[in-house]
Amino acid sequence: MNIPVTSSLNDLLGPSIFLLILDMFLENPCQWMNLREIARRIDKNPGSVSPVIPNLVERGILQDCKVGKVSIVYHLNESNPEVKALQRLKQELTTSS
């Protein structure tokens, strides 16, 4: 039985803001983004995105950097072994579909 594989973790595992953010960073691993840019790119309200970001930072998936007095930008932590595994999974999903 062949099961179609999709290129998005969100499509594969079900709708989740967590997965939308993770997918977006996996597609843009070298970019630093603030909360508003993350929300804009995944087409969600910043209020819906803001509770998820600290969890991704705590897990070591994202790195944060304070810019100015109050602004924080986020970046994919490519040195994390879990992120490397997610990147391989994303690549496999992309090449399989």
Image: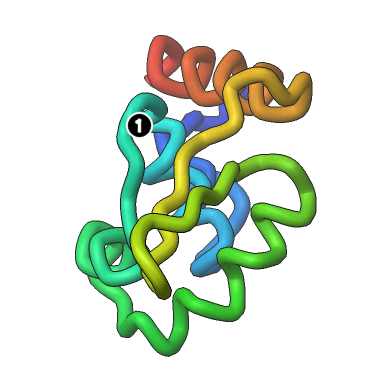
Measuring from the top left, give residue 27's x and y in whole percent. 35, 31
Which residue is denoted by mark 1 in the rendering? 27
Measuring from the top left, give residue 89's x and y in whole percent. 60, 21
Q: Is residue 9 left or right of residue 54?
A: left
| Front residue of this view, candidates 55 and 86 | 55
In this view, the residue farthest toward the bottom is 47
Q: Which residue is located at x 31 percent, y 34 percent?
A: 31
Q: Is residue 33 above or below residue 6?
A: below
Q: Is residue 69 above or below residue 87?
A: below
Q: Which residue is located at x 32 percent, y 51 percent?
A: 33
Please identify the quadrant where the N terminus is shown: top right
Please identify the quadrant where the C terminus is shown: top left
Q: Which residue is located at x 60 percent, y 70 percent?
A: 52
Quadrant housing residue 8: top left
Amino acid type, callout 1: Glu
Measuring from the top left, give residue 15's x and y in whole percent. 51, 66
